[in-house]
Image (tube, grey):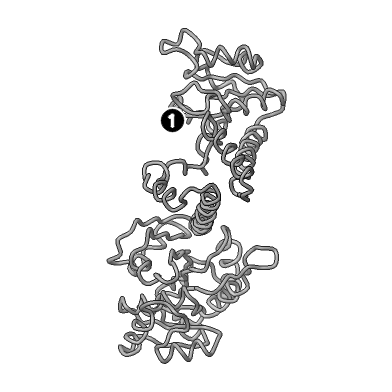
Amino acid sequence: MKIVICGMGYVGITVSACLLKQGHHVVGVDIDPAKVDLLARGVSPINEPEIDGLLQSGLQAGLLTSDTNLKPHLVDASMVFVCVGTPTAEDGSLDNRYLRQAAADIGQGVTQRPADAESLICVIRSTAPPTTIRSLIVPTMEAASGESPGSGRYDVVFNPEFLRESTAVYDYFNPPKIVIGEREQGVSDRMRGIYDGIDAPLFEVSWEVAEMVKFTDNAFHALKVSFSNEIGRLAQTLGVDPAQTMDIFVSDTKLNISPYYMKPGGAFGGSCLPKDVRAINALGHGASVDMPIMANIMNSNQSHKDYLAQRVMTRTPKGGRILQLGLSFKTNTDDLRESPLLDLANTLIGEGYVVDIYDPDLSSADGQQPTLQHMALQENNPQVSQAMIDKLPDMAPYDVVVFGKAIIDMRELKPLGDKVINIHRLEG
């Protein structure tokens, strides 16, 4: 295919080199004449292993050209990759001016394509916040072209990159995943061709999910580095080997380096996590070690509890009836220590809602006797204890049913439609 790459920074150069290796004809476009001149000689404007050799091979094979003007090359291109920079703006957001300009140029360029030409696939690879494609890229292209994506002239996909500098070529051909955000199912079928022979999980999702995935990845990577450094500072100050500590930590791929605890839903609770987070903060304070991430974990957890309570209250008329499914901090335990669901129940009752709470985990196996935790609740928190019910009631009369933990099959709640608020797992 003839593929135009807009933006010859780290991402654009890497994509160009790797597409050349796959045998595509690549046109590298950049507003900087110096970069275009280097590319014309098969020289990379960035220092990245393997790139120069791939550019030279592509140039010698007649597959590489370069230009400062994007529009003429769109006439017969199959795809255009937008890899322009999105630097930080003064307010901390991303500066999208280069994205907007690229979208306008592409919109104007597609008007020059033959009427019978195959639709141009516009692939956005620049990092962009969720809704950027829908609220900025598409409207800009529509205004410039006079047509909407899917009209036959062009279509838009968001295909984030997961490349690390210094190993970018390896990462291109060995990605952890391939994510393609599309306008509607099937639009991205032609994108799959450039990934032939690359073994990785493929996710075809909405534009917004694809945009959010890229942000989530980078935020988590930054969090991991900062978390590890906080542990390292504390360990070293206490005379503990930080490297050995973290080597053992990452060896646990069942809980630590795994999908566990990575499902958005309820806040954490129970006997261990809150207690030990406070303890490690006290340890850091006593050792005069600054640990901002650790110091804010409990604040973040409280913010999430507040968010979940607000979700329920905004969906329920004041004084309305609420059925809360679950009270202990997770399924198959009666442990109420620091349970977010207990906090939720106290909040809702305190705000004047009529709350019934069903949790079979707080009864004996035969359902006849309350557990010790339940009996302690009767003494220590009578208002919540009085809200407990022994059997799952008819749920239809309630204004809202809060699915707090997996004590019944979610499919049983399907007939209730919008009455159900799932805080066990956030979706939609």
The quadrant in which residue 171 appears is bottom left
Is residue 232 depicted above or below 78 in this figure? above
Q: Where does residue 135 sit, x and y in percent of width and height?
A: 60, 62
Element type where label 1 sits in the image: helix
Q: Residues within 10 Å of mark 1 (few under 14, many from 20)?
A: few
Say whether residue 208 is visible: no
Q: Where does residue 148 sit, x and y in percent of width and height?
A: 53, 67
Is residue 72 depicted above or below 123 in this figure? below
* Residue to which mark 1 is pinned: 411
At 43% across and 91% down in the image, what residue appears? 40
Is residue 81 depicted above or below 328 in this figure? below
Residue sitting farthest toward the left: 197
The one of 232 and 27 positioned closer to us in this rendering: 232
Q: Is residue 70 left or right of residue 15?
A: right
At 62% across and 28% down in the image, what residue appears? 343
- Indicate the amino acid at tag 1: Arg
Residue sitting farthest toward the front: 239
The one of 216 and 244 positioned closer to us in this rendering: 244
Q: Where does residue 94 sit, x and y in percent of width and height?
A: 62, 66
Say whether residue 135 is visible: yes
The one of 172 and 240 positioned closer to us in this rendering: 240
